[in-house]
Image (spheres, grey):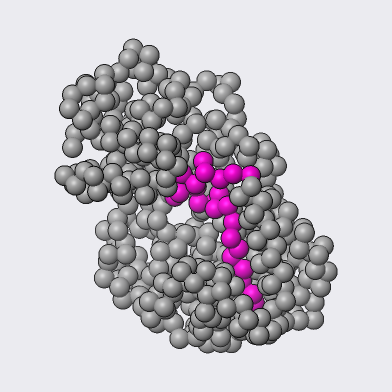
Amino acid sequence: MRPGPRIQAAAEVLEDIFSRHQPAASALQDWGKKHRFAGSGDRAAIGTLVFDALRQRLSLAARMGSAEPRALAIAAATKALGLSPDDIARACDGGPHAPAALSDDERHRLDASIDAETAPHIAADIPEWLMPSFTRAFGDRALVEGRAMAERAPVDLRANTLKAGRDKVLAALEKMNVAPTQFAPHGVRIPAPVGPAKSPHAEAEASHGKGWFEIQDEGSQIAAALSGAKPGHQVLDLCAGAGGKTLALAAAMENNGQIYAYDSDKFQLRPIFERLQRAGVRNIQVIDGGDTAALNALGPRFDIVFADSPCSGSGTWRRKPDSKWRLRPEALATRQKEQREVLKRAASLVKPGGRLTYVTCSVLPEENVDQAAWFVEAHPEFTLTPFGEIWQATLGATPPVSADGSSDTLQLTPASHGTDGFFIATFTKRS
């Protein structure tokens, strides 16, 4: 497919997303089923164009003077397909499967930038109702933080030290232009693709099949490391999901000690079994998903309860930009209630002197610092342990500055740390 049909296809997918409120991945899959003539390269380019348009939906619409799918696809094509404004004008020739010719206004706007007086939430590509939360979290850096979350994300891997060190993984994936991560000691980064290029499929590599590494954002790796899990510990991963952080905890414990993995959703938990086998993990006991009786029967025995709580997912907007526009205030309120329930249950399972690590993949203070403050007030038997102390003890390095300026809890962000948005708070139970 030439650029014109790719732009037109992206506009059609965006229309499907907006009119049917479909997730982007589902809309792209539906388009592919209806257009089986499109090759893998075409589908990848169209997907890149759609996701770039969603990442910067507000600022592109402001630039084009229109929020229609056609306008967004045309505007996003400069970066997503590596096309100049003149290239786009030639591609939009009204031919078969191509967009109609550009108007004079559209051609002019492709060379323009958004106005300096544009509203902050538009310039930052953040839903307007969330801009006060960003401002509360980041102050005068809210615009910078929002813009960074509207860019493409790299692919991060964690070397599975039960089978391979980071140097071994770096050597195995050298062709992918990999490099060590900045903070996580076992992390490997594949840089974000530029223009129409796509990220390499690391999971197709033999080294992945051998269990040498797992796909895991550096922020997630840091969160697992800051739990302080060590060989011999009794650890509960309370919201294990598919087990990414569970595997990181097992590697940190060198298969020595015991990890219980639990999730309220048995479907989310199901993939963990294959991952455990591939990674060579032997110290994890998986509790049946949703079996709260079995979970509660464990009692307050744990050195560490790791609670990666359900959240808005705002920290992953680079990877799932459509979720940014689907989030609603009532959904955020529901997540906050769920988070408090998770914290209550976690607190009941920590032994005296043990730790509770609360984690979200969010950048919203309502889910992060507000919940930490609520927990300390509601559970006076716990104290908040400053993240810097734990960072130095577990990672042996000078800790970074939290993106929200806190000295007690750690807010990781794309702009400040190059990671996804992750929040980490550690509570210690009095002996």
Between 400 and 192, the one nearer to me in the picture: 192
Do we see residue 147 in this rendering?
yes
What is the x, y in percent for residue 46?
Answer: 29, 41
Residue furthest top as drawn: 104
Quarter placement of the N terminus: top left
Q: Is residue 158 magenta?
A: no
What is the x, y in percent for residue 220?
Answer: 52, 62
177 relative to 389 in the view: left or right: left
Quarter placement of the C terminus: bottom right
Instruction: Give the residue at x 56% y 23%.
Output: 118
The correct choice, above or below, for 68 with respect to 365 in the image is above
The correct choice, above or below, for 290 with respect to 387 in the image is below
Instruction: Give the residue at x 35% y 45%.
Output: 27
Instruction: Give the residue at x 64% y 47%.
Output: 330
What is the x, y in percent for residue 89?
Answer: 27, 21
What is the x, y in percent for residue 111?
Answer: 38, 20
227 relative to 420 in the view: left or right: right
